[in-house]
Structures are given as C-alpha cells and as structure tokens.
Amino acid sequence: MIVFHQGRIILEDRLLDNAALVVSEGRILEVGSSESILSRTAGERIDLAGAFLGPGYVDLHVHGGNGADYMDGTPDAVITANRAHARHGTTTIFPTTTTGSRVQLERMLQACVDVKAAWGTSQGARIGGVHYYGPYFAADKVGCHSVEGRRDPSADEYQAAFDFEIIKVATCAAELPGAEAFYREAKARGCLVTCGHSNASFQEMQAAFDAGMRHVDHFWCAMSSVSTIRQRLGAPFQASMEQFVLMNREMSTEVIADGQHLAPDLLEFAYRMIGADRLCLVTDANRALDLVPGKYRFGPQEDGAWFESDGNVGFVENGSLASSVSGMAHLVRTMVKDTSASIPDVVRMASLTPASRIGMDTELGSLSVGKRADLLVLDEGLNVHRSFIGGIELTI
Ligand SMILES: [Zn+2]
Ligand SMILES: [Zn+2]
C-alpha cells in the first residue's frame, strides 16, 4: 500500500484539498481527507506537502520526441519517444502513423506491438494503442506530410494493418473514394473513427458519421472551413467539418494547445462551444520535442519531409505549421493560462476525455476508486515532478 497525503487532488469535477489517495496492488483503493485516511491506514507514505496529485495524461495524437519519430519503426525509437513524453506527464500514449509506404507503416506497427508487450517502468508512457493516422489524407490537405506518401484507402492494406490488433484510433479523409468502407471496418474493429487532413463538405461528413466516424483531428488544422468548401464547390456557401462538429453532440475533437497553433481566443471558443467532455488536448508532437532548434524530418528518418523547429513549434518553408514540439504538461499549463477552464476541466481534457473516447475510461483517465493508479505529482505551476503507472514510479 502507498498513501499519498497532504495533497491537492485533481478529481474530474473538483479539487480536493488536504486530501489523501491510497494505492493498493496498483489500483486506487480510496480517496478522501488526509486526516481520516492517515489515522487508519498503514503502508508507505508519500507527503505531497500541498502539491497537486492528478491523473496521468492520455495523448491520442503524437508523432515522436527527443529525436525519435514513431515512423522510424524501431523499438528503440518507440521507447525514446515514450520516455520523452512520460517526462511531460503522458502515461498512456497512442503512437501515430504518418504518410509513408506500406512497409514503413507495418514496420512501425510491429515495433509498437513489441514495445507494448514488453513494457516496464523504465520505458516511459505505456502504449494504449496505435493511431493509424496517415496515409489516407486528402491531396489538398496533407499539411507538412509528404504528398508522395498519401493515398486513397485500400482494403487490402488497412485490413493487414488492423490485423496487428494494436490500432485503437483510425483516421481517413471523408471525401476519399473508399472512405466509408474504411470507417465501417475501423468501427467494427473497435476504433475511435476520425476524419482528418480533409476538405470534406457537410454532406460528406454526414455520410462518414453514418459509417461510424465520431471525431475530427486537430480542430482548425488541415480541415475544411466554409471558405475552403466555397472554393471547392462554389455558391451557395456550405457548411464544413467545423459546423458538423459544433452542431453534433456525438462528435468529439482535439486541439493542439501549445500556444503556437491556436490563439487564446480559439482555445477559449473550443472549450466553451465543445466542452471538456468532448474536447481532447493532443500534443501532435514531432521528434524535435526536447531538442535544440534545427532541421528535422517528419515521419521516417530515411525519407520523411523536412521541417524546421525554432524551439517553440515546427514549421515548413511556406510558413505553415508542422506540428508541435511541446509535451502534454505544457498544453495543460497553456489552457489554464489562456482560457477560463478550471484546472479539473483542463486536466480532464488531457486524461478522462481522451480515455473515454477510446473506451478506456473504466481502466484509467481519472483518480476514481478501482482505476489503475496512473498518477502525476505536479507543483503549483503544474510542472511534473513524479509520475507513476499502476502505482509504480517511472524511472525516466
Ligand atoms: Zn495532422
Ligand atoms: Zn499529427
């Protein structure tokens, strides 16, 4: 048994001051007042001395960190990125594919299967599943990814990918031929089905929704708007992915809240219009996380597209952004600073909301009795000091 006491415990809907949390056999046994729990519970004691105790973060969309991109396709690269993200508070991670060849994608899936099977506390964040993100992007919305690596969905390819039995999030642009069949298969395989890197119209979104799509990748980035649909389909103006998400309570989405992709007014808008129960924070971090400014490859080391990091964000030559170089703890701090969301609401968007969209919320995502003890000790500035998975401290 471990008793964390004298903490400010971050619950999904409120803060609990002078509180204690008991871990037994890797799970949360009890949460309550320090005084009462200390008076009747034996075991190892960890005095939080007023620090926050929160749930480990869950990142659904992340490409790499500390020099490694998951598409490098080796267990070493996967572990390097998982360790880097654990230092920023992520305890459950969804390594994310990009555009690339079928061989490169399958190599990445196999590396994630191997690392997941042999996970230990020296290896950082635990893999919750893979986000099969590229290669099914729309040609006009590839963003920083290599255009040559994108293609339309092919059943032969994605069936083989799903057969690795590790994919838990599956993305495809809704307007591509074969998208609906892809969505149906992803749904049947138990995935969170998402539309991204897409210039889809409202009607294409409705067809995608009917096939099981329920989420949109990085809201406002590489997605359609009224004006891009106007350019594509002419007058009268039509609704886009943005209106579809805002109008439909069954849809969720995510923001890259690194303070570089979206201004405070858009973060506040997303929080207020979409809400903490449907909005996830995702790092979308690339390999330049925790590295010095410089030129790096997005995707596979051997042939990924080049981008530049200035230490705050990635960008490409035309000035477009090329995903973040920030960890989840930075996103949490940014949301607290830039929006009216409370600390419990912000932390929820980084833990319980993604966990519930992926169907893992009975196991993790909040400090509820019975869940796995994935815990973060945070100082008053919400910097990560210690992290635990299943009650065991990570050695990272
Ligand atoms: Zn993207
Ligand atoms: Zn991404």
Image: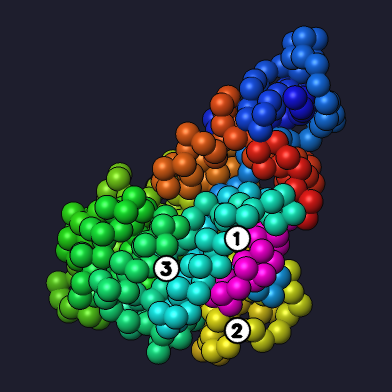
Write the start and end of the magenta stretch as one range.
69-87
Q: Is residue 174 visible?
A: yes
Whether residue 376 sits left or right of residue 197 in the image: it is right
Identify the residue shown where x is 77% and y is 9%: 40
Q: Quadrant of the C terminus?
A: bottom right
Q: Distance from label 2 to label 3 (Cα)?
A: 18 Å
Q: Toward which corner of the image does residue 133 lie, by quadrant? A: bottom left
Tag 3's secondary structure? Answer: loop
Tell me the number on the disc at residue 133. Answer: 3
What's under tag 1, amino acid-wise?
Val
- Residue drawn at x 73%, y 45% is 387
Q: Nearer the viewer, mark 1 or mark 3?
A: 1
The reply to whether the magenta stretch includes residue 70 is: yes
Label 2 belongs to which residue? Answer: 301
Q: Report the front residue among 383 and 167.
A: 167
Residue placed under numbered mark 1 in the picture: 115
| Disc 2 crowd, CA 10 A, few/some/many (<14, 14-19, 20+) | some
Q: Is residue 292 above or below residue 57?
A: below
Magenta part mainly helix, strand or loop? helix
Answer yes or no: disc 3 within 8 Å of ligand 2. Answer: yes
Instruction: Identify the amino acid type marked 3.
Output: Tyr
